[in-house]
Amino acid sequence: MAEKSRGKCINLALQGGGSHGALTWGVLDRLLEDDRLTIAEISGTSAGAMNAVVLADGFERGGRDGARSALHDFWKAVSDAARFSPIQRSPWDRALGNYSLDLSPGYLFMEGVSRLFSPYELNPMGLDPLRGILERQVDFDNVNQCRDIAVHVTATHVRTGRAKIFSRGAVTADAVMASACLPQIAQAVEIDGED
């Protein structure tokens, strides 16, 4: 659904990091509320890439309100999935209102194990619940066809360390997952025979 451009055009660069991504959702929600602004392009890495594709898909489906709803639904799904994670705050942290994972038994265990074993040994099937959420929530055809907002996703090529930018026509779940890939916990994402 094309929405007539009005107001000041802005381009956004969205950073990665899970908590940064959740914070950015709130900022994007506010920007989408303001019809004096028109988002023309979004570039993102990791959680920023997820926000970018979710926003573009939602915008293509239903304009500003569609984008706001899509972002809400995506982060709600991520939050719901995290409830079952073994990496939780300790009972002591909960009692003291501390939101750090520094004393989380699950976090400390995974931190230690990830130093001894690669993701290929720990997760040989390459299972990734975040990929499932992304694939259920986002229609990548909408992202690539979005007429109003151009999306650019950046990932790092494993062998060269160079950035690879995926833009209209090439933005896929694989590109977003490659952008969000943490080498100590996830296998490299292969795209066109390259990691």
Image (cartoon, rainbow, N blue to C red):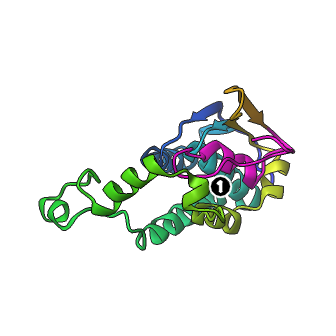
Name which quarter of the figure residue 157 lies in: top right
Q: Can residue 45 be seen in this view?
A: yes
Name which quarter of the figure residue 79 lies in: bottom left
Query: In the rendered structure, which segment of residues is drawn in magenta?
Result: 167-195
Residue 191 location (% of width, % of height):
80, 46
**Residue in the image at 53% along x and 40% along y:** 16
| Left or right: where 193 falls relative to 188 | right
Q: In which quarter of the image is the N terminus?
A: bottom right
**Residue in the image at 61% along x and 39% along y:** 45
Q: Is residue 22 visible?
A: no
Question: Taking 88 as reference, is 159 above or below it?
Answer: above
| Of the pair 52 and 103, the residue shown nearer to us | 103
Majority SS type along the magenta span: loop
Q: Mark 1 points at which residue?
A: 54
Question: Taking 192 as reference, is 139 above or below it?
Answer: below
- Give, as a three-letter code, the residue at label 1: Val
In what element is the residue under mark 1? Answer: helix
Is 191 magenta? The answer is: yes
